[in-house]
C-alpha cells in the first residue's frame, strides 16, 4: 500500500488513495518518483507515462512535467560554483584585471551570441557563462572607480540570489508577504534618518525614476484634476533646479509633458551649489511672465562635483512661494547614516520628497532606490492608483492596506528593499556609518596625496567622495596656461583612459565640465578599497601618461 508520493525537486503531492489491484503506473505521475511502502524501505522507480493513457491536446502530451529538473539543478549548482570561483573569490584580488577589454566587433566574434532552434548542451552553457564573466567589467574590483557605485557587498549578494530564485513581485501581500513587510520596515527607518516623524515611500528602478515620481507627485498636488483631465486645461507649469542637477530632471519633464523649456536651471557657485538668491529671482520672473511655478528640485551630491545645495535656504524660499521641495539625494543621501557627515544635508527634513539610492555609497546592489515622501495622507496612492479589481480586491481576507502596488507606476516590481535590509541587518547602523566614514576618509587621503605630487592638480576641494583633478604630463608642466595649454590638456585624460582600459589595471571616469577641459573624476565607495589602491591610482596614471 502506498502512503505518499514525493516529486523529485518539486512540491509534495497529495496521498494516493489505496486502490487494490491497480497498477502503480498512473498517467498523471511524473517520470520519476520516490515510493515509500509499508515495509519501511524507500526505492526509486521509473514512472514513464503509458502511451495508451497519454493525454494529448493539439498534439502535445500533457502527462507529467517536461522540465528536466535534475539537469536544471545540476546547471544551477555548477554555475553557482563558477560565480563563486570567478567573481566572488576574486573580488578583492588586485592582481586580476578590472576588465578584459575587446572592441565591439571583436567581442561579437569571441562571444557566441546567436540564438538557435535547438538548445545548447550543459558544458557549452557553462563555457558561455565563463565568457560572460571574463569579458565583463568587474565592478566589484577594488580599482573600479568609474561610476557612483562599486564593490561587492556579500549580504546584498545573498539577498539577490534569494530573490532571483524566489522570483517574487511586490504588489500584493498575498504574493509577497515577507518582502512587503521588509520594504515597510526599511522605508520607515530611512524616513527616520531624514528627520520626518512619519511619511510614505516606495522603491523603484533608479534615481531617475524617483525624480520623475516626485515631479509628477508635485504636479498632482498642485493640480489634482490632471489625473483625470490631462494637460489641456493647465497653465504653463514651470520648475526650478540646479544647473548641476542630474540629467534625469530634463528627461522627467519631457516624459511628463511639462517640456524641457519649462525647466529653469538656477546658477551655482564655484563649488557647484545652487545660489538661493538666483532661485528666488527666477521664481519671481516666471510668475511675472504668467507661468505657474510648482516645484524646486535641490541636489544633495551632484554627479560630477559632489556638491550639496543649501537646503535650509532653499526650503525658506519654497515655503514663501508655496512650492514643493524635492531633494535628489540619490548619491549624497547615504551621508545621513554618518553622524560626522550628515551635516552636508542639513535642512533635508524640510523637503516634501527625497530620492535616496542605497545601491550607491551603501552598496546595496543595483538597483536599490527609494522615493520618500513626507505626506502621510496616501498622496502616492491617490496620484498613481488605477484600482485594478483583478489585483487590488477590497474584499480580501487580510488587511488590504498592505497591498502597496497601487502606489507604484509599475505593476511587476522587484523586492529591492530586501537587499538593503539584509546588509543593514548584517552590519547594523554603526557598520553602515563606518562604510560612509571610511570612504570619505580615503577620499581625503587621496586629496592630500594629489596636492603633494607633481603633475596633479585639483579642480576644487571636495566635500564628498568625488575627487576631480587633472593630470598634467611632463611636456605641459612648463607651458603657460593659455588656450594652447588647455587644448592639449583636454586630450590627456581620454588618452590615459584608453590605455588603462586596454591594460585592465583600473577604471575611472573623466569629463569636461562647464568650461573646464577633460579631467578625471575619482569616486571612492567600496570598503575593499585601501590606501594602497589610492597610491596605485596616482602611480598608474603617472605611468600611463608620463610620455605624453
Image: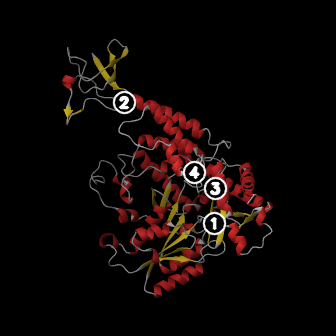
- Residue 279 place in picture, x, y as percent: 55, 79
* Front one among 67 and 286: 67
Sequence-first tag of 1 and 4:
1
Q: Quick one: SS at disc 2?
A: loop
Label 1 crowd bin: few (<14), some (14–19), many (20+), radius 10 Å: many
Give the left or right position of residue 131, taking residue 40 as reference.
right
- Which badge, 4 or 2, comes first in the chain's sequence? 2
Residue 1 in view: yes
Mark positioned earlier in the residue sequence (1 or 3): 1
Q: Mark 2 touching mark 1, by CB under 8 A?
A: no
Spatial CA distance of label 3 from label 4 is 27 Å
The quarter of the image holding the C terminus is bottom right
Image depth: mark 4 or mark 2 in front:
2
Residue 57: where, in percent of width, then height?
20, 35
Q: Quadrant of the N terminus?
A: top left
Front-lying residue, 536 or 27:
536
Q: Which residue is nearer to you in this view: 347 or 254?
A: 254
The answer to whether the residue labelled 4 contacts the one labelled 2, judged by CB atoms less than 8 Å apart, is no
**CA–CA distance in space, label 2 to label 3:** 46 Å
Q: Mark 2 points at which residue?
A: 68
Circle 2 or circle 3, nearest the eye: 3
Q: Which residue is drawn at 53% across and 47% down?
A: 106
Q: In this view, does 134 lie to the left or right of 547?
A: left
Residue annotated with mark 1 = 305
Element on which disc 1 rests: loop
Amino acid at each position: 500500500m502506498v502512503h505518499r508520493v514525493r516529486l523529485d525537486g518539486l512540491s509534495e503531492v497529495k496521498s494516493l488513495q489505496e486502490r487494490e489491484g491497480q497498477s502503480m503506473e498512473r498517467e498523471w505521475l511524473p517520470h520519476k518518483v520516490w515510493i515509500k511502502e509499508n515495509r519501511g524501505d524507500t526505492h526509486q522507480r521509473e514512472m514513464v507515462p503509458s502511451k495508451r493513457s497519454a493525454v494529448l491536446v493539439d498534439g502535445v502530451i500533457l502527462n507529467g512535467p517536461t522540465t528536466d529538473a535534475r539537469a536544471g539543478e545540476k546547471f544551477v549548482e555548477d554555475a553557482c560554483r563558477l560565480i563563486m570561483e570567478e567573481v566572488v573569490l576574486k573580488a578583492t584580488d588586485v592582481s586580476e584585471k578590472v576588465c578584459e577589454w575587446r572592441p565591439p566587433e571583436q567581442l561579437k566574434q569571441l562571444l557566441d551570441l546567436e540564438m538557435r532552434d535547438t538548445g545548447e548542451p550543459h558544458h557549452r552553457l557553462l563555457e558561455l557563462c565563463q565568457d560572460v564573466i571574463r569579458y565583463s567589467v568587474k565592478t566589484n574590483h577594488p580599482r573600479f572607480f568609474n561610476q557612483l557605485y562599486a564593490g561587492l557587498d556579500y549580504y546584498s549578494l545573498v539577498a539577490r540570489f534569494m530573490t532571483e530564485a524566489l522570483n517574487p513581485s511586490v504588489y500584493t501581500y498575498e504574493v509577497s508577504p515577507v518582502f512587503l513587510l521588509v520594504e515597510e520596515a526599511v522605508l520607515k527607518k530611512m524616513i527616520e534618518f531624514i528627520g520626518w516623524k512619519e511619511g510614505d515611500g516606495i522603491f523603484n528602478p533608479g534615481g531617475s525614476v524617483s525624480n520623475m515620481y516626485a515631479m509628477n507627485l508635485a504636479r498632482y498636488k498642485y493640480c489634482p484634476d490632471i489625473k483625470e483631465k490631462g494637460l489641456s486645461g493647465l497653465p504653463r507649469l514651470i520648475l526650478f533646479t540646479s544647473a548641476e542637477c542630474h540629467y534625469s530632471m530634463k528627461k522627467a519633464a519631457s516624459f511628463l509633458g511639462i517640456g524641457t523649456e519649462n525647466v529653469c536651471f538656477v546658477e551655482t557657485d564655484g563649488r557647484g551649489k545652487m545660489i538661493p538668491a538666483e532661485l528666488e529671482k527666477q521664481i519671481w520672473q516666471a510668475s511675472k511672465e504668467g507661468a505657474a511655478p510648482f516645484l524646486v528640485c535641490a541636489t544633495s551630491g551632484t554627479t560630477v562635483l559632489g556638491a550639496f545645495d543649501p537646503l535650509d535656504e532653499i526650503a525658506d524660499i519654497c515655503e514663501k512661494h508655496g512650492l514643493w521641495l524635492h531633494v535628489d539625494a540619490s548619491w549624497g543621501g547615504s551621508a545621513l547614516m554618518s553622524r560626522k557627515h550628515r551635516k552636508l544635508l542639513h535642512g533635508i527634513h524640510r523637503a516634501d520628497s527625497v530620492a535616496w539610492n542605497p545601491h550607491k555609497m551603501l552598496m546595496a546592489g543595483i538597483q536599490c532606490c527609494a522615493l520618500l515622501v513626507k505626506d502621510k495622507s496616501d498622496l502616492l496612492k491617490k496620484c498613481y492608483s488605477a484600482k485594478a479589481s483583478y489585483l487590488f480586491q477590497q474584499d480580501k481576507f487580510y488587511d488590504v492596506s498592505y497591498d502597496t502596488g497601487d502606489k507604484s507606476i509599475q505593476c511587476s516590481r522587484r523586492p529591492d528593499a530586501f537587499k538593503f535590509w539584509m546588509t543593514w541587518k548584517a552590519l547594523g547602523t554603526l557598520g553602515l556609518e563606518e562604510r560612509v566614514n571610511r570612504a570619505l576618509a580615503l577620499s581625503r587621503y587621496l586629496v592630500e596625496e594629489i596636492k603633494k605630487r607633481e603633475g596633479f592638480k585639483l579642480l576644487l576641494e571636495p566635500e564628498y567622495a568625488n575627487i576631480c583633478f587633472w593630470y598634467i604630463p611632463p611636456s605641459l608642466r612648463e607651458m603657460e596656461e593659455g588656450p594652447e595649454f588647455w587644448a592639449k590638456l583636454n586630450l590627456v585624460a581620454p588618452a590615459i583612459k584608453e590605455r588603462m582600459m586596454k591594460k585592465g589595471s583600473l577604471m575611472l571616469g573623466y569629463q569636461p565640465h562647464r568650461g573646464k577641459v577633460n579631467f578625471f573624476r575619482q569616486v571612492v565607495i567600496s570598503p575593499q578599497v585601501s590606501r594602497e589602491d589610492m597610491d596605485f591610482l596616482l602611480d598608474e596614471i603617472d605611468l600611463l601618461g608620463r610620455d605624453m
